[in-house]
Image (cartoon, helix red, strand yellow):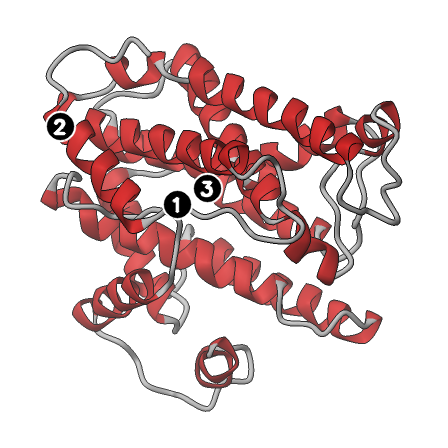
Amino acid sequence: MFSEELKQFGPHGISHKTFSETEAFAYCKHLTERHYENFSVVSWLLPKKLRQPFQVVYAYCRWSDDLSDEHDGSNESRIKSLEYLHWWEQGLDDCFQQDKPVPNHPVYIALRKVLEQFRLPKQPFADLLVAFRRDQVQYRYAVFEDLLDYCRYSANPVGRIVLHLVCETEPTPEQLICSDSICTGLQLANFWQDVSRDIEIGRCYIPRSVAEEFGVDIENIRDSSAFRKMLQYLITDARSRLRNGVPLVNSIPKTVQNNIALFIRGGLAILDAIEKNNYNVLEQRPTVSQWTKFRLLVNTWMSRSKYDW
Protein backbone atom coordinates (compact mmCIF):
# COMPACT_ATOMS: atom_id res chain seq x y z
CA MET A 1 0.00 0.00 0.00
CA PHE A 2 1.34 3.40 -1.00
CA SER A 3 0.03 4.97 2.21
CA GLU A 4 2.51 2.85 4.15
CA GLU A 5 5.38 3.91 1.91
CA LEU A 6 4.32 7.53 2.27
CA LYS A 7 4.39 7.07 6.02
CA GLN A 8 7.93 5.74 5.73
CA PHE A 9 9.47 7.95 3.04
CA GLY A 10 7.13 10.93 2.67
CA PRO A 11 7.79 14.52 3.83
CA HIS A 12 6.92 13.51 7.39
CA GLY A 13 8.33 10.00 7.07
CA ILE A 14 9.31 8.06 10.13
CA SER A 15 12.21 6.33 8.40
CA HIS A 16 15.54 8.08 8.87
CA LYS A 17 17.51 5.37 7.14
CA THR A 18 19.98 6.52 4.51
CA PHE A 19 19.92 4.09 1.63
CA SER A 20 23.05 2.95 -0.11
CA GLU A 21 22.97 3.12 -3.91
CA THR A 22 22.62 -0.67 -4.01
CA GLU A 23 19.61 -0.55 -1.69
CA ALA A 24 18.07 2.35 -3.61
CA PHE A 25 18.32 0.50 -6.91
CA ALA A 26 16.86 -2.63 -5.29
CA TYR A 27 13.90 -0.56 -4.03
CA CYS A 28 13.22 0.79 -7.55
CA LYS A 29 13.43 -2.72 -8.98
CA HIS A 30 10.96 -4.03 -6.40
CA LEU A 31 8.59 -1.13 -7.05
CA THR A 32 8.66 -1.80 -10.79
CA GLU A 33 8.06 -5.52 -10.47
CA ARG A 34 5.20 -5.39 -8.00
CA HIS A 35 2.98 -2.97 -9.91
CA TYR A 36 0.57 -4.30 -12.52
CA GLU A 37 0.80 -2.67 -15.93
CA ASN A 38 -0.72 -3.60 -19.27
CA PHE A 39 2.78 -4.55 -20.35
CA SER A 40 5.96 -5.08 -18.38
CA VAL A 41 7.88 -1.82 -18.11
CA VAL A 42 11.19 -3.61 -18.27
CA SER A 43 10.84 -6.73 -20.39
CA TRP A 44 13.59 -9.19 -21.09
CA LEU A 45 13.86 -7.64 -24.55
CA LEU A 46 15.59 -4.62 -23.01
CA PRO A 47 19.42 -4.70 -22.88
CA LYS A 48 20.59 -5.59 -19.40
CA LYS A 49 22.51 -2.32 -18.97
CA LEU A 50 19.29 -0.33 -19.45
CA ARG A 51 17.01 -2.31 -17.15
CA GLN A 52 18.14 -0.59 -13.98
CA PRO A 53 17.83 2.97 -15.40
CA PHE A 54 14.34 2.12 -16.71
CA GLN A 55 13.37 0.84 -13.26
CA VAL A 56 14.56 4.07 -11.65
CA VAL A 57 12.62 6.23 -14.12
CA TYR A 58 9.55 4.09 -13.55
CA ALA A 59 9.92 4.44 -9.77
CA TYR A 60 10.05 8.23 -10.12
CA CYS A 61 6.91 8.21 -12.30
CA ARG A 62 5.17 5.78 -9.94
CA TRP A 63 5.80 7.92 -6.89
CA SER A 64 4.73 11.07 -8.74
CA ASP A 65 1.50 9.43 -9.85
CA ASP A 66 0.73 7.95 -6.43
CA LEU A 67 1.31 11.29 -4.71
CA SER A 68 -1.20 12.91 -7.06
CA ASP A 69 -3.75 10.19 -6.24
CA GLU A 70 -3.29 10.41 -2.47
CA HIS A 71 -6.73 11.92 -1.86
CA ASP A 72 -10.34 10.89 -1.30
CA GLY A 73 -11.88 13.40 -3.69
CA SER A 74 -12.36 16.17 -1.14
CA ASN A 75 -10.88 19.63 -1.61
CA GLU A 76 -8.84 19.22 1.55
CA SER A 77 -7.19 16.03 0.35
CA ARG A 78 -6.51 17.49 -3.09
CA ILE A 79 -4.72 20.38 -1.41
CA LYS A 80 -2.71 17.79 0.49
CA SER A 81 -1.79 16.09 -2.79
CA LEU A 82 -0.59 19.43 -4.15
CA GLU A 83 1.56 19.84 -1.06
CA TYR A 84 3.03 16.37 -1.57
CA LEU A 85 3.80 17.16 -5.20
CA HIS A 86 5.48 20.41 -4.19
CA TRP A 87 7.66 18.47 -1.75
CA TRP A 88 8.46 15.91 -4.47
CA GLU A 89 9.45 18.65 -6.94
CA GLN A 90 11.75 20.22 -4.37
CA GLY A 91 13.47 16.84 -4.14
CA LEU A 92 13.77 16.77 -7.94
CA ASP A 93 15.35 20.23 -7.93
CA ASP A 94 17.91 19.13 -5.35
CA CYS A 95 18.58 15.90 -7.21
CA PHE A 96 19.63 17.84 -10.31
CA GLN A 97 21.92 20.20 -8.40
CA GLN A 98 25.25 18.51 -7.93
CA ASP A 99 26.30 21.02 -5.28
CA LYS A 100 23.44 19.90 -3.03
CA PRO A 101 23.17 16.61 -1.12
CA VAL A 102 20.88 14.07 -2.74
CA PRO A 103 17.43 13.95 -1.07
CA ASN A 104 17.13 11.15 1.48
CA HIS A 105 14.70 9.08 -0.56
CA PRO A 106 15.56 5.78 -2.29
CA VAL A 107 14.16 6.95 -5.64
CA TYR A 108 16.23 10.13 -5.66
CA ILE A 109 19.37 8.36 -4.44
CA ALA A 110 19.09 6.00 -7.41
CA LEU A 111 18.01 8.75 -9.81
CA ARG A 112 21.06 10.92 -8.99
CA LYS A 113 23.30 8.06 -10.14
CA VAL A 114 21.33 7.58 -13.37
CA LEU A 115 21.44 11.32 -14.07
CA GLU A 116 25.21 11.28 -13.74
CA GLN A 117 25.52 8.27 -16.05
CA PHE A 118 23.18 9.41 -18.83
CA ARG A 119 23.12 13.21 -18.39
CA LEU A 120 19.33 13.26 -18.53
CA PRO A 121 17.57 16.63 -18.91
CA LYS A 122 15.48 17.89 -16.02
CA GLN A 123 12.55 19.26 -18.05
CA PRO A 124 10.73 15.97 -18.82
CA PHE A 125 10.79 15.00 -15.13
CA ALA A 126 9.41 18.40 -14.15
CA ASP A 127 6.79 18.33 -16.93
CA LEU A 128 5.26 15.18 -15.48
CA LEU A 129 4.54 17.03 -12.26
CA VAL A 130 2.70 19.72 -14.22
CA ALA A 131 0.21 17.06 -15.35
CA PHE A 132 -0.19 15.58 -11.88
CA ARG A 133 -0.89 19.00 -10.38
CA ARG A 134 -3.42 19.62 -13.13
CA ASP A 135 -5.22 16.43 -12.13
CA GLN A 136 -6.03 18.05 -8.79
CA VAL A 137 -7.95 20.94 -10.32
CA GLN A 138 -9.14 19.86 -13.79
CA TYR A 139 -11.68 17.07 -14.29
CA ARG A 140 -13.05 17.91 -17.76
CA TYR A 141 -11.60 18.92 -21.13
CA ALA A 142 -13.44 21.27 -23.46
CA VAL A 143 -11.80 20.36 -26.78
CA PHE A 144 -9.38 17.74 -28.07
CA GLU A 145 -6.52 20.26 -28.11
CA ASP A 146 -6.89 20.63 -24.33
CA LEU A 147 -6.57 16.88 -23.87
CA LEU A 148 -3.53 16.73 -26.15
CA ASP A 149 -1.92 19.49 -24.11
CA TYR A 150 -2.48 17.37 -21.01
CA CYS A 151 -0.82 14.41 -22.76
CA ARG A 152 2.09 16.68 -23.60
CA TYR A 153 2.85 16.77 -19.88
CA SER A 154 1.45 13.46 -18.63
CA ALA A 155 2.78 11.05 -21.27
CA ASN A 156 5.21 12.59 -23.75
CA PRO A 157 7.93 13.37 -21.16
CA VAL A 158 8.31 9.64 -20.45
CA GLY A 159 9.13 8.94 -24.09
CA ARG A 160 11.63 11.77 -24.15
CA ILE A 161 13.38 10.41 -21.07
CA VAL A 162 13.50 6.98 -22.72
CA LEU A 163 15.02 8.46 -25.88
CA HIS A 164 17.82 10.01 -23.84
CA LEU A 165 18.43 6.64 -22.21
CA VAL A 166 18.55 4.58 -25.41
CA CYS A 167 20.06 6.98 -27.96
CA GLU A 168 23.79 7.47 -28.17
CA THR A 169 23.31 11.05 -29.38
CA GLU A 170 20.84 13.86 -28.71
CA PRO A 171 17.38 12.85 -30.04
CA THR A 172 16.52 14.46 -33.37
CA PRO A 173 13.37 16.58 -33.87
CA GLU A 174 11.92 13.76 -35.98
CA GLN A 175 12.52 11.23 -33.22
CA LEU A 176 10.89 13.52 -30.66
CA ILE A 177 7.81 13.95 -32.86
CA CYS A 178 7.45 10.18 -33.29
CA SER A 179 8.04 9.56 -29.59
CA ASP A 180 5.38 12.11 -28.63
CA SER A 181 2.93 10.50 -31.04
CA ILE A 182 3.51 7.05 -29.52
CA CYS A 183 3.22 8.28 -25.94
CA THR A 184 0.08 10.30 -26.62
CA GLY A 185 -1.43 7.28 -28.37
CA LEU A 186 -0.62 5.05 -25.40
CA GLN A 187 -2.07 7.58 -22.96
CA LEU A 188 -5.29 7.88 -24.98
CA ALA A 189 -5.57 4.08 -25.24
CA ASN A 190 -5.43 3.89 -21.45
CA PHE A 191 -8.00 6.67 -21.10
CA TRP A 192 -10.50 4.89 -23.36
CA GLN A 193 -9.82 1.60 -21.60
CA ASP A 194 -10.54 3.20 -18.22
CA VAL A 195 -13.56 5.42 -18.95
CA SER A 196 -15.62 3.67 -16.28
CA ARG A 197 -12.89 3.84 -13.63
CA ASP A 198 -12.37 7.55 -14.24
CA ILE A 199 -16.09 8.26 -13.96
CA GLU A 200 -16.07 6.61 -10.53
CA ILE A 201 -13.59 9.21 -9.25
CA GLY A 202 -15.37 12.12 -10.93
CA ARG A 203 -12.97 12.46 -13.85
CA CYS A 204 -13.61 12.29 -17.60
CA TYR A 205 -11.01 12.67 -20.33
CA ILE A 206 -13.48 12.57 -23.22
CA PRO A 207 -13.41 16.11 -24.71
CA ARG A 208 -16.75 17.82 -24.29
CA SER A 209 -16.76 18.96 -27.93
CA VAL A 210 -16.34 15.36 -29.13
CA ALA A 211 -19.13 14.12 -26.85
CA GLU A 212 -21.48 16.85 -28.08
CA GLU A 213 -20.68 15.99 -31.70
CA PHE A 214 -21.88 12.43 -31.10
CA GLY A 215 -24.81 13.43 -28.89
CA VAL A 216 -23.32 12.09 -25.66
CA ASP A 217 -23.97 13.82 -22.33
CA ILE A 218 -20.55 14.11 -20.72
CA GLU A 219 -22.10 14.56 -17.27
CA ASN A 220 -24.33 11.51 -17.55
CA ILE A 221 -22.47 8.94 -19.61
CA ARG A 222 -24.47 5.82 -20.41
CA ASP A 223 -23.86 2.95 -22.79
CA SER A 224 -25.60 3.65 -26.09
CA SER A 225 -25.04 3.43 -29.83
CA ALA A 226 -23.99 7.10 -29.76
CA PHE A 227 -21.45 6.43 -27.02
CA ARG A 228 -19.99 3.45 -28.90
CA LYS A 229 -19.74 5.41 -32.15
CA MET A 230 -17.91 8.13 -30.27
CA LEU A 231 -15.53 5.61 -28.76
CA GLN A 232 -14.93 4.10 -32.20
CA TYR A 233 -13.85 7.54 -33.37
CA LEU A 234 -11.55 7.97 -30.38
CA ILE A 235 -10.02 4.51 -30.88
CA THR A 236 -9.32 5.26 -34.55
CA ASP A 237 -7.58 8.48 -33.54
CA ALA A 238 -5.40 6.77 -30.92
CA ARG A 239 -4.47 3.96 -33.32
CA SER A 240 -3.40 6.52 -35.91
CA ARG A 241 -1.13 8.25 -33.40
CA LEU A 242 0.55 4.97 -32.46
CA ARG A 243 1.14 4.06 -36.10
CA ASN A 244 2.46 7.53 -36.88
CA GLY A 245 5.19 6.91 -34.35
CA VAL A 246 6.42 3.67 -35.93
CA PRO A 247 9.29 5.32 -37.89
CA LEU A 248 10.97 5.92 -34.54
CA VAL A 249 11.69 2.20 -34.17
CA ASN A 250 14.03 2.02 -37.15
CA SER A 251 15.85 5.20 -36.12
CA ILE A 252 17.07 4.02 -32.71
CA PRO A 253 19.82 1.50 -31.84
CA LYS A 254 18.95 -2.06 -32.85
CA THR A 255 19.40 -3.29 -29.28
CA VAL A 256 16.25 -1.41 -28.18
CA GLN A 257 14.13 -1.53 -31.33
CA ASN A 258 12.21 -4.62 -30.19
CA ASN A 259 11.36 -3.08 -26.85
CA ILE A 260 9.97 0.15 -28.32
CA ALA A 261 8.09 -1.88 -30.93
CA LEU A 262 6.53 -3.89 -28.10
CA PHE A 263 5.21 -0.72 -26.47
CA ILE A 264 3.51 0.26 -29.73
CA ARG A 265 2.07 -3.21 -30.26
CA GLY A 266 0.89 -3.24 -26.67
CA GLY A 267 -1.03 0.00 -27.19
CA LEU A 268 -2.55 -1.32 -30.39
CA ALA A 269 -3.56 -4.50 -28.54
CA ILE A 270 -5.46 -2.43 -25.96
CA LEU A 271 -7.33 -0.66 -28.74
CA ASP A 272 -8.04 -4.00 -30.45
CA ALA A 273 -9.43 -5.35 -27.17
CA ILE A 274 -11.81 -2.38 -26.90
CA GLU A 275 -12.89 -2.87 -30.50
CA LYS A 276 -13.34 -6.61 -30.01
CA ASN A 277 -15.57 -5.85 -27.03
CA ASN A 278 -17.76 -3.73 -29.32
CA TYR A 279 -16.63 -0.55 -27.50
CA ASN A 280 -18.45 -1.60 -24.34
CA VAL A 281 -16.01 -0.08 -21.83
CA LEU A 282 -18.63 0.98 -19.30
CA GLU A 283 -19.83 -2.45 -18.23
CA GLN A 284 -16.56 -4.35 -18.61
CA ARG A 285 -13.01 -3.02 -18.70
CA PRO A 286 -11.28 -4.40 -21.81
CA THR A 287 -8.01 -6.14 -21.01
CA VAL A 288 -5.21 -7.80 -22.90
CA SER A 289 -4.92 -11.48 -22.02
CA GLN A 290 -1.68 -13.05 -20.83
CA TRP A 291 -1.67 -15.18 -23.97
CA THR A 292 -1.91 -12.07 -26.17
CA LYS A 293 0.93 -10.43 -24.24
CA PHE A 294 3.08 -13.53 -24.68
CA ARG A 295 2.24 -13.72 -28.39
CA LEU A 296 3.15 -10.06 -28.89
CA LEU A 297 6.41 -10.60 -27.04
CA VAL A 298 7.33 -13.61 -29.16
CA ASN A 299 6.29 -11.98 -32.44
CA THR A 300 8.30 -8.88 -31.62
CA TRP A 301 11.33 -10.92 -30.64
CA MET A 302 11.13 -13.04 -33.79
CA SER A 303 10.82 -10.04 -36.10
CA ARG A 304 14.00 -9.67 -38.14
CA SER A 305 12.81 -7.27 -40.81
CA LYS A 306 12.39 -3.52 -40.57
CA TYR A 307 9.21 -2.38 -38.86
CA ASP A 308 7.02 -1.07 -41.66
CA TRP A 309 3.58 -1.49 -40.07
Q: CA distance from mark 1 to mark 3?
A: 34 Å
Question: Circle 2 — which element?
Answer: helix
| Three-letter residue code for mark 2 | Thr
Q: Which mark is residue 255?
A: 2
Question: Circle 1 — which element?
Answer: loop
Specify whether 26 is left or right of 10: left
The x, y position of residue 151, in whole percent, is 61, 35
Task: Out of 36 and 279, give the one closest to the viewer.
Answer: 279
Query: For residue 121, what is the image quadrant?
Result: top left
Query: For residue 74, what is the image quadrant?
Result: bottom right
The residue at the point 28 percent across, 26 percent down is: 261
Give the residue at mark 1: 288
Task: Out of 222 and 253, give the one closest to the viewer.
Answer: 222
Label 2: few (<14), some (14–19) or many (≥20) C-alpha neighbours in 10 Å: few
Mark 1 and mark 3 lie on one chain; the one further toward the N terminus is: 3
Residue 254 seen in render: yes
The x, y position of residue 113, in whole percent, is 25, 54
Give the residue at mark 3: 122
Tell me if residue 146 comes above or below residue 307 in the rendering: below
Question: Circle 3 — which element?
Answer: loop
Q: Are marks 2 and 1 in contact (CB under 8 Å)?
A: no
The residue at the point 70 percent across, 53 percent down is: 135
